[in-house]
Image: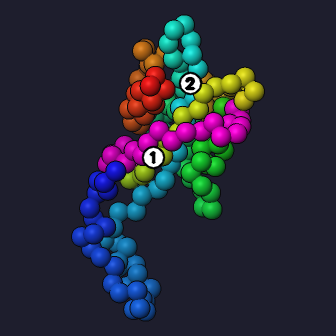
Amino acid sequence: MPFLGSSWDEQPLPAIEKSWTLEEVTAHHKTRALHTIVVDVVVWRPFCNGIEVLLIKRKYEPFAGSWALPGGFVEVGETCARAARRELEEETGLVALGPGLSLVGVFDALGRDPRGPNIGIAYVIKYRPIMGDPRAADVATEFGWFSVNSLPQTAFDHANIIALATTEIES
């Protein structure tokens, strides 16, 4: 897949052998957008000849009171997959055991989060009873299972993530 933003090759870094001062490093980074990394998890299950996904209702802004996928920020020293497992457990109580998480895609549209630019790494996992019973916890006030054919309004770009995950699930 080609790199969709070309800013990395428009402003090449100075030669590696150069010793940079703190001021030079700071000035260099001010010319680049700093993105945070977030993860989202699509938990799905078969239901009545269709697919349902698990959504949480957000407690905090942005989008307080809106339905969203479980997810959140990747912490320092954490892989994206580990962050996805942690956020899933923190927000729903579900434990993603084994190799069940699969990558859905990378979502980096400008404006996808009103807090600032971020790169979303989305995963999908099929719900299994061994994962536990879902519950609302941490930043979630409630949870619900929703048919992919009749989703409520969702926060961020989560409808797009669910649509792509559904395509992969059905194939």
Toward which corner of the image does residue 84 lie, by quadrant? top right
Out of 52 and 75, give the one closest to the viewer.
52
Residue 50 appears anywhere in the view: yes
Residue 69 is a magenta residue: no
Q: Residue 44: which numbered mark, if any?
A: 2
Q: Is residue 83 above or below residue 166?
A: below
- Going by the image, does 13 lie left or right of 134? left
Toward which corner of the image does residue 10 lie, by quadrant? bottom left
Task: Please report whichever mark, 2 or 1, sits nearer to the chain's N-terminal start.
Answer: 2
Which-is-in-front pick, marks 2 and 1?
A: 2
Out of 156 and 65, give the one closest to the viewer.
156
First to last magenta residue range: 93-115
Q: Which residue is mark 1?
A: 120
Farthest top residue in view = 48
Residue 114 is a magenta residue: yes
The secondary structure type at the circle numbered 2 is: strand
Out of 104 and 85, give the one closest to the viewer.
104
Q: Position of residue 120 (x, y in %)?
A: 45, 46
Q: Mainly helix, strand or loop, the magenta region?
A: loop
Amino acid at dot 2? Trp
The secondary structure type at the circle numbered 1 is: strand
- Going by the image, does 117 lie left or right of 11? right
Q: Residue 47: which numbered mark, if any?
A: none
Q: Position of residue 13 (x, y in %)?
A: 34, 79
